[in-house]
Image (cartoon, rainbow, N blue to C red):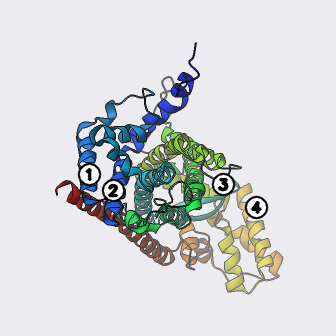
């Protein structure tokens, strides 16, 4: 029979406390050690702890770091959680003085500081992966700047463009996604330490000093908000979700382009699996893996954001331990997806023959014929559109490419304009070629080499700015770790 007078109840221990303990071991123990050291330094520098007491606690913390094998610990229920395991270890070494480290702080402000520090690391890695993908796509777009493809709308062949132009559109969105994630990363740079349980402390603490030692930009100002506001969680996972929503659409295109009936995208053998029974099959299954990893990652982000919905605006477990740990799975699956896409897209190539076949069969250069009639013949666009439509209908009925439709064109032109065209057959063939179509679209954002080159230069500049800010934030974290070690060791070594 369960003893209801003693904590913890065995079921509560096994279903909640033990899993949380394992999560702390895996995700937060190092961060907790940093918080303990930073808080100790601040208590000593403000005179809240005497020098001898600070040195004794510092020596004990160093001994705990050196002698306790965190990975080997198992949850026994003797202590409520890992925090109390560390405090008990301090008291074993120092007696009552071991409890002095907790002066002017709470597990409330400690927890959200731990969570932010863990999210900082994961967001840093994710931003590195996203910027690497951006760089790879910019390089690929430059390489494929003149590689013709068929652009589709509503699942139908629409107009010619280039693979580089398509990839540049992907880069633009990815850069905006990276900027949103970077802004969310900046939202992690405000330290909750010093908020204590809800209202700060009656002791003369120095919140800025702790924030500096832990690598934060500054303290999060409102103490109630430090333990109640979860916008750092919702903003981060909302921004992260968009990355995979948007990349998933690109992956969907890759699946369509690689289909036998379309055949525009060639996936190399290293990224193709064969059927166990059908030897002719080339299955580009990485596309499927990227698609489901993108969807799973977006869904995992939704789980975290939706868990915050309709929760009390206060300290609560709904935004802590298990929820935070569950969110890390989104980073893990998302990282796999981005790594695979970074390898996949640069390795693929365009099947020029299939592009040419579809271009001919679908008359996708016909818009430029209509545009030329407006410019060269002085027709209205509606007149030009009618001539182009009759021309396209005639060549499609004859299963001929548009460039062979000069006779049908001249007939349609005379019927609509009431006169003969000034276009020669050579000019007609030039106007209806895919290469000419692309070269004529030299406006900002267009696929012509000059316009695309300018865009790629701009994307590279944006990526450089983003990377510079990201590195500066990382440098602040690194410098803080060095400063914390120096400040803490000054108490250990004296």
Callout in the foreground (2, 3): 2
Look at discs 4 and 1 and give the one toward the viewer. 1
- Measure the C-alpha gap from mark 1 to mark 2: 8 Å
Question: Which of marks 3 and 4 precedes in the sequence?
Answer: 3
Q: Which mark is residue 58?
A: 1
> Which residue position holds label 2?
40
Where does residue 416 sit, x and y in percent of width and height? 82, 77
Q: Quadrant of the N terminus?
A: top right
Can residue 12 be spotted in the picture? yes
**Disc 1 to disc 3, C-alpha distance:** 36 Å
What residue is drawn where x is 36% and y is 69%? 472
Relative to 33, does residue 443 appear above or below in the rendering? below
Judging by the rendered image, the residue that carries numbered circle 3 is: 313
**Sequence order check: which comes first, mark 1 or mark 3?**
1
Of residues 148 and 127, the one nearer the viewer is 127
Q: Which mark is residue 393?
A: 4
Task: Answer whether labels 1 and 2 touch (C-beta < 8 Å).
Answer: yes
Q: Mark 2 or mark 3: which comes first in sequence?
A: 2
Q: CA distance from mark 2 to mark 4?
A: 81 Å
**Dot 4 surroundings within 10 Å: few (below 14), some, or many (20 or more)?**
some
Report whether 354 appears left or right of 216. right
Residue at 23 percent across and 48 percent down: it is 59
Q: Alpha carbon of mark 2 to alpha carbon of mark 3: how far?
A: 30 Å
């Amino acid at each position: 029979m369960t003893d209801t007078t003693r904590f913890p109840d065995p079921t509560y221990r096994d279903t909640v406390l033990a899993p949380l303990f394992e999560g702390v071991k895996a995700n937060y123990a190092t961060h907790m050690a940093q918080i303990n050291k930073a808080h100790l330094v601040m208590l000593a520098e403000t005179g809240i702890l005497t020098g001898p007491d600070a040195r004794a606690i510092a020596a004990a913390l160093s001994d705990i770091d050196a002698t306790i094998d965190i990975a080997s610990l198992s949850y026994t229920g003797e202590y409520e959680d890992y925090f109390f395991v560390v405090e008990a270890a301090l008291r074993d070494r120092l007696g009552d003085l071991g409890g002095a480290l907790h002066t002017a702080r709470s597990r409330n402000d400690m927890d959200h500081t731990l969570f932010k520090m863990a999210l900082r690391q994961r967001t840093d890695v994710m931003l590195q992966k996203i910027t690497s993908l951006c760089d790879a796509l910019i390089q690929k777009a430059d390489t494929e700047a003149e590689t013709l493809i068929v652009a589709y709308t509503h699942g139908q062949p629409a107009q010619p463009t280039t693979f580089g132009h398509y990839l540049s559109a992907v880069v633009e969105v990815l850069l905006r996604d990276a900027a949103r994630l970077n802004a969310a990363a900046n939202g992690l740079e405000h330290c909750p330490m010093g908020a204590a349980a809800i209202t700060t402390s009656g002791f003369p603490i120095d919140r800025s000093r702790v924030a500096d030692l832990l690598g934060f930009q500054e303290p999060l100002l409102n103490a109630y908000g430090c333990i109640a506001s979860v916008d750092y969680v919702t903003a981060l996972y909302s921004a992260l979700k968009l990355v995979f929503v948007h990349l998933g659409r690109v992956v969907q295109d890759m699946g369509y382009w690689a289909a036998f009936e379309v055949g525009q995208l060639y996936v190399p053998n290293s990224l193709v699996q064969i059927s166990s029974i059908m030897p002719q099959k080339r299955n580009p299954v990485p596309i499927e893996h990227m698609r489901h990893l993108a969807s799973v990652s977006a869904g995992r982000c939704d789980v975290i954001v939706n868990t915050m919905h309709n929760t009390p605006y206060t300290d609560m477990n709904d935004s802590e331990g298990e929820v935070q740990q569950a969110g890390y799975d989104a980073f893990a699956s998302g990282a796999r997806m981005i790594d695979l896409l970074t390898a996949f897209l640069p390795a693929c190539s365009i099947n020029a023959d299939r592009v040419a076949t579809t271009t001919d069969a679908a008359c996708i250069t016909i818009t430029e014929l209509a545009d030329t009639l407006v410019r060269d013949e002085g027709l209205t666009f509606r007149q030009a559109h009618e001539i182009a439509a009759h021309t396209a209908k005639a060549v499609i009925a004859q299963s001929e490419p548009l460039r062979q439709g000069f006779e049908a064109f001249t007939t349609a032109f005379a019927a609509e304009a009431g006169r003969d065209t000034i276009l020669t057959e050579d000019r007609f063939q030039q106007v209806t070629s895919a290469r000419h179509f692309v070269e004529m679209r030299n406006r900002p954002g267009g696929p012509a080499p000059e316009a695309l080159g300018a865009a790629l230069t701009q994307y590279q500049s944006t990526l450089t700015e983003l990377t510079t800010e990201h590195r500066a934030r990382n440098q602040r974290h690194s410098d803080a770790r060095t400063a914390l070690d120096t400040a803490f060791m000054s108490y250990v070594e004296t």
